[in-house]
Image (cartoon, helix red, strand yellow):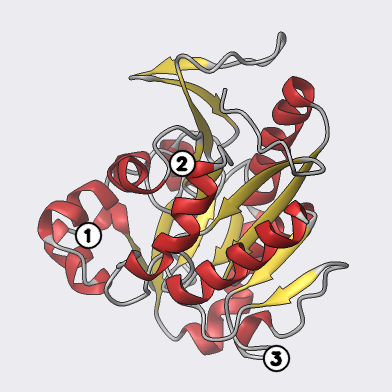
Amino acid sequence: MPKRASNMRHGLVIFTDLDGTLLDSRTYDFTPALPALDLIHSRGVPLILVSSKTRAEIEVLRRKLAPDSPFISENGGAIFFARTFVLPEGIAYEERGPYKAVTLGRPIEEVLDRAAKLKGEFRFRGFSEMSCQEIAALTQLKQEEALLASKREFDEPIVLENFVEYGERFCKKAVELGLECVTGGRFIHLSMGANKGRAVERVLTIYRELEGPVCSVGLGDSPNDIPMLEVVDKAVVMVPRGAGAMRDFVHSDLIWAEGGGPEAWSKAILAIVEDLAS
């Protein structure tokens, strides 16, 4: 386990969304965030990537952004800890590749079975129905990156026709079928049994049992980040105050990171770390 900085009152744990938050929403670049990344890595602060991306996608980014920290894939479908991470007694996990996986979401096959029941009323297509070429065109990913994005284990991103007119009713019907239905930056996401907030709470429970009190920070830019932002001590919203779907979000310790993206992410993290260390 990484050691905490001795001059911090409590340990710090940072949870961050990726696209539009730590990564530029168009180019996926994180270079402007390097000053803050260097600082938190030098202080041994866990940086936990929390994304709608698949495990395969996050693995590539984790090597560059947070090589020693757990990560949360597919909107809270599972939490992946390195096999060397000593989990508290009683935490159920399964071994998946080089990880101890704490699974919260139901398998993608169950999600797709439920989602199929919506086909009679709505016109939509999910990643499971798309070729890698289609996924690449929708996401502006390269072909090899689109292949990683297609490796879904818990969460199905979909494109709904006439979203403005039918989006609210679609999600209501999905929830009636036992599905989680959240809107991300580009897609509606369908899953069962998990969301980012539940996964973050589980991680915090583990860190608190292992290390005592921690201060948690969450950063996100879209409605599917709200469950995560609601359960952390400090919430950072990566859009201008009062903008878009996040305009009604409230939190007892809320920061609006004007501009969003990696540069705003870096400024917010640097300010928070400085404040906690003072």
In this rendered view, identify the residue nearer to me: 162 or 33. Answer: 33
Q: Residues within 10 Å of mark 3 (few under 14, many from 20)?
A: few
Quadrant of the frame with the N terminus: top right
- Under circle 3, the secondary element is loop
Q: Find the distance from the CA under tag 1 to the CA under tag 3.
A: 35 Å
Mark carried by residue 242: 3
Relative placement, left or right, of 198 versus 20 is right
Question: Whole-percent x and y of residue 252?
Answer: 88, 67
In this rendered view, identify the residue nearer to me: 154 or 161. Answer: 154
If you read the primary sequence from the N terminus, does the residue marked by circle 2 or circle 3 appear first? Answer: 2
In this rendered view, identify the residue nearer to me: 196 or 153. Answer: 196
Q: Give the image quarter of residue 27.
A: bottom left
- Under circle 2, the secondary element is loop
Question: Whole-percent x and y of residue 24?
Answer: 37, 73
In this rendered view, identify the residue nearer to me: 253 or 273. Answer: 273
- Under circle 1, the secondary element is loop
Q: Amino acid at mark 3?
A: Gly
Q: Nearer the viewer, mark 1 or mark 3?
A: 3
